[in-house]
Structures are given as structure tokens and as C-alpha cells.
Amino acid sequence: MKLKSIISIIMIAVLAFLAASCSTSEEINGNSKNDNNVSFNSKKASSKSENNPNHYKKLYGKLQRFDNVIDTKDFSWKGEKYTLDSDTTDENYTKSWTGDKGGHIFTNAGYICYSAKEFSYNYDALLWDKQGKLRKDFDTVTKNVSGVYGISEQEALERVQKIIDKYNISATDIKAYPLDKNVLKILARDYMSDEEYEEYIKDDERGAMKRDFTKEDEVYIVTMKPTVGEYILYNNEYDYGRNVSDGSWIYALVRRDKVINLYIGDVFETEKNRRDIDKIITEDEAKDLLAEKFRNNILPDKVVCNSVDITYISVNGGEKLEFIPAYVFEVKYPIANDKENSSDITYVTENILLDAEKGKWIE
């Protein structure tokens, strides 16, 4: 994916800069080699790890299988009929269907993606931030919106919950945000300005992405957090223990007359057996490890820790997946754009993860 490639290039540049910084004795902005290079702006994530270190368990399981249980009627609108396009017998259990009204369903191990014909050009580009991740500010951009045309918030929630329950998907924290015609217009211009759009359509006579919306286009975006047992799963891409994950996500767009889009990614079936984790490191110990990680780097400014949280991730345990707790630090890396101008600094924000049991960085 293009956005992920861009992010990868940026992070390679960051790491290259940090590596180069370690090999020089130059001081920038007075940061000597032994300075504490991390500034914490975060509140405590949780008291569970300190008050009850045995609260966390190690769970086991596998990616949930959907190819043999999908009922295309769950995604049918006004009698839309689906034809099976592909049916593989590989370990990913891949299947895809195309509807006679332009709908599409795709399943894979741990994954369901459904989209109606109008989703791609009308809504898809509006849901993502500049890093290619699902926007985190839907609550902010919809704070003055009371609802959308033709459907209540409760009806939208129930439509999505019905599918989640039918396929035995473990999730929590379901929320619905009203994207009325004004919010949709704002999101469209946030993604691409009017000037950029004029240039864009010169190369695409279809006009592609919708720019102006009516009440007929209004939708709720419904989000929820996949879980293993009672634990919420991490929802960003990572690579650890020979296991690459795109992160665990569930979201849907619901219009008055149908579900426009449903995405369920990296969800799991867990076994009943679990084991106690003798002890996880405390949050203070985790912060000390973060400070140590950057202690010997010469930087143009401090690394800023915006937040710290604790979540669960899946790792490759051999024959089956293991689910373990991990600390998530959101940090801002400083990069000097001009060595002659110490105030010319760019910051790159990224999440870094720490295995909460072993105290090892997940990189």
C-alpha cells in the first residue's frame, strides 16, 4: 500500500538519523550523550499492572475462519444476489463474492470485508488520516451533529451488532458517529482540497470521489474494538515473533437503507485454556526502559512521549498464536532539517511497543 510504504520510508530515515547520531560526539541544543532524552507528557495508563500484577494472562488461539459460515444474505440489499468468484483451499481460507448490484464480499483468515457499489467513490477516502489509519477524531468532527437522515443511532448500532453476534466475533466498546452531509463535505475537503480535486479530475473523467453530499448520503460510522477474552487487541500494524499483523479493527458505515461497508480485520478464536503471567513490568519500569532506549542518542530535541497504554497483541507461538500484554508508547521523534538552524526540527509520530512480560521491544 502506498501510505504504508511512505510511512516505512519515513521511519527508515528516522532510524538512520538516530544511528548516525550515536556515532558522533556533537552536541545539539545542549543535549549531551548522557542526557535523559525523553519527555513524558502522559498520564498513567492503568493501575492494574502495579496493584495486581497477576491480572494479565497469556491466551492461545488462532485466526477466526469465516469462509464456511458467511451468509451473503446478511449483505444483500433489495434482493442483491451474489456469485462466488473464487474459492481457495489454502491455509488462509480465501473466498470472494460479487453481487449483481455491484456489492463485493471478501473473506480470509480472521478477515471479512464487505462494500456496496457506492462505498469506494463516495466514502472510502474520507475515513483515513494522513498516516493511512482510521481517523481518531470522529467524536470531534461530529460533536455538533445530533443524527443523520432516516436512521437512528440505536438502529445503526443494532444492525452492526447483529452481524457481529451472528459470527461470534468478540468485541467491545461499540460506538456510532453521525456523518451528516456537512461533516462528509468537510472530510472530503480534508482529504483533497478543491484545487487538488480540479487537477485530479483532469486525469479522471469520471470525477471519482464525491465532493458534495445531500441528506440521502448521510451515514453513521460504527466502530468497536476486537478482543481476546476480556482484553482489547492492538489496532495498528506490527511485526513480532515471526507474526505480522495489520492490527485488529472493526468498523462499518450504515445508511438509512443498508450497510454500505463492513470491515472486520484480524479477529481470533481463543482457546479456553490460559496461563497466569507471573509478573509484568510496571508502567514506571516500562518508562525507564523507554528513557534508556534513547539515552545515548544525540538529538536536536527531546523525544516526547504523548501517551502510554497497555493492550494485547498476537505473537507466533509455533503451532498456535499466543496473546500477550504489551505497553504502547506514542512518541514524537525530532529530526533536524538543517544543522545550521537548530530550531528547524520536524517531528515524526509513531507507536512503539514493549513486551510487558519480557521487557523486550517489539520492532
Image: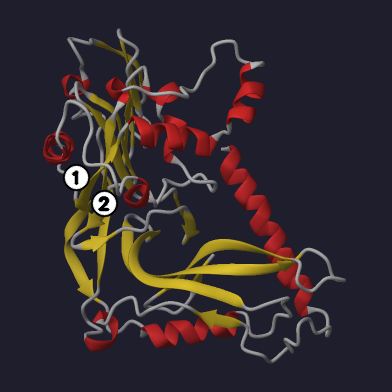
Residue placed furthest toward the right: 340
- The quadrant of the picture occupied by the N terminus is top right
Query: Where is mark 2, residue-wise?
Result: 226
**Residue 4, image x, y percentages:** 57, 45
Circles 1 and 2 in contact, beta carbons < 8 Å:
yes
Percent across and percent down for residue 239 are: 49, 57
Instruction: Name the residue tied to disc 1.
Output: 169
Vertical relation: 99 (above or below) 244: above
Residue shown at 27% from the left, 52% from the top: 225
Left or right: where does residue 48 sit relative to residue 236?
Answer: left
Count all numbered tags in the image, as a single digit: 2
Name the residue nearer the viewer: 291 or 246. 291
- In this view, 3 is above or below 229: above
> Which of the 4 image quarters holds residue 152?
top left
Q: Nearer the viewer, residue 42 or 320?
A: 42
For numbered disc 1, what is the local secondary structure? loop
Identified by mark 2, the residue type is Pro
Taking the image as shown, residue 53 lies to the left or right of residue 337, namely: left
The location of residue 192, given as percent across then percent down, is 56, 33
In the rendering, which numbered label is found on residue 55? none
Give above or below for 33 relative to 158. Answer: below
User: What residue is at 19 percent from the left and 45 percent from the top?
Assistant: 169
Q: Amino acid at mark 1?
A: Ile
Report the quarter where the C terminus lies: bottom right
